[in-house]
Amino acid sequence: SQQGEEDPQALSIQEGENATMNCSYKTSINNLQWYRQNSGRGLVHLILIRSNEREKHSGRLRVTLDTSKKSSSLLITASRAADTASYFCATDHGGQNFVFGPGTRLSVLP
Amino acid sequence: GAGVSQTPSNKVTEKGKYVELRCDPISGHTALYWYRQSLGQGPEFLIYFQGTGAADDSGLPNDRFFAVRPEGSVSTLKIQRTERGDSAVYLCASSLMSGPRNGETQYFGPGTRLLVL
């Protein structure tokens, strides 16, 4: 079974708005990563947050981690049409492999 | 190389046939991962190599699936007696050294789209 679960499954917003995606997981982790996948292409790493961190920023991205709730959120500010993609969270699973959630499909309308 | 490459980009085969999918990781990366991704789903872990050895093969669905990395660089995923349910995109990723526990960035290839008729 998958470790991570993102919600919402799909999100449609206007350009300039903020997009928030959430990820929940089941067991303890060492780190959590967010990836982006454009249609028909490979995944691209966005940001990593470790289990002892609560928040990280990278450009227009902000990630939070709440280990007590076993959840993370990804915020994309001032969204652009080019942000249209699927977003996945991935957690290390016992440190031996990565487990991805089913993803959030984000559509940013011009 | 400049990035992770995978060949072929597309593979169509008949049920029961044998297929091999190839992954060329970024030069110098010791960790290599194989995933399978079905339409509308996230990548599903198959196997993780550290160098030449499989550090974790717990994701391989059954004994029809096998992967090798004999020289610690190129890897081949082999599927015997293919079934229609094996149809998916097979993704390969590599990372520099230390693997999942340290959260090392994975660099993904574009994938091989396998269709079993």
Image (cartoon, coloured by chain):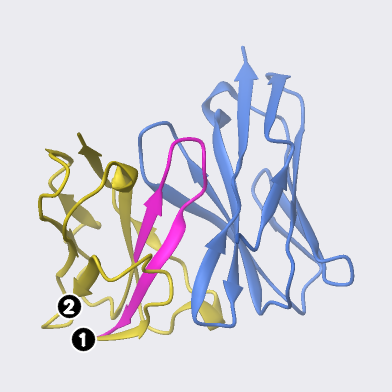
Q: Check the image and report above or below for A77 versus A29.
A: above
- Tell me, yes or no, whether dots 1 and 2 are on the same chain: yes
Percent coordinates x, y for residue A99 in the rendering: 55, 64
Identify the residue shown where x is 72% and y is 30%. A78
Q: Magenta span covers which residues?
A: B34-51
| Chain identifier matching the blue colour in the rendered picture | A
Percent coordinates x, y for residue B30 in the rendering: 28, 81
The image quadrant of residue A71 is bottom right
Lower position in the chain sequence, tag 1 or tag 2:
1
**Disc 1 residue type (three-letter):** Thr
| Chain identifier matching the yellow colour in the rendered picture | B
Q: Is residue B39 magenta?
A: yes
Identify the residue shown where x is 51% and y is 48%. B42
Q: Which residue is mark 1?
A: B52
Considering depth in this image, is B58 or A54 the residue closer to the camera? B58
Q: Which residue is mark 2?
A: B69
Q: Are marks 1 and 2 in contact (CB under 8 Å)?
A: yes
Q: Main secondary structure of the magenta part?
A: strand
The image quadrant of residue B66 is bottom left
Identify the residue shown where x is 52% and y is 27%. A82
Percent coordinates x, y for residue A67 in the rendering: 83, 71
Label count reads 2
- The crowding category of the residue bearing disc 2, from other C-alpha atoms within 10 Å (few below 14, some 14 to 19, many at least 20), is some
Q: Check the image and report above or below for A64 versus A87.
A: below
Q: Check the image and report above or below for A16 versus B4.
A: above
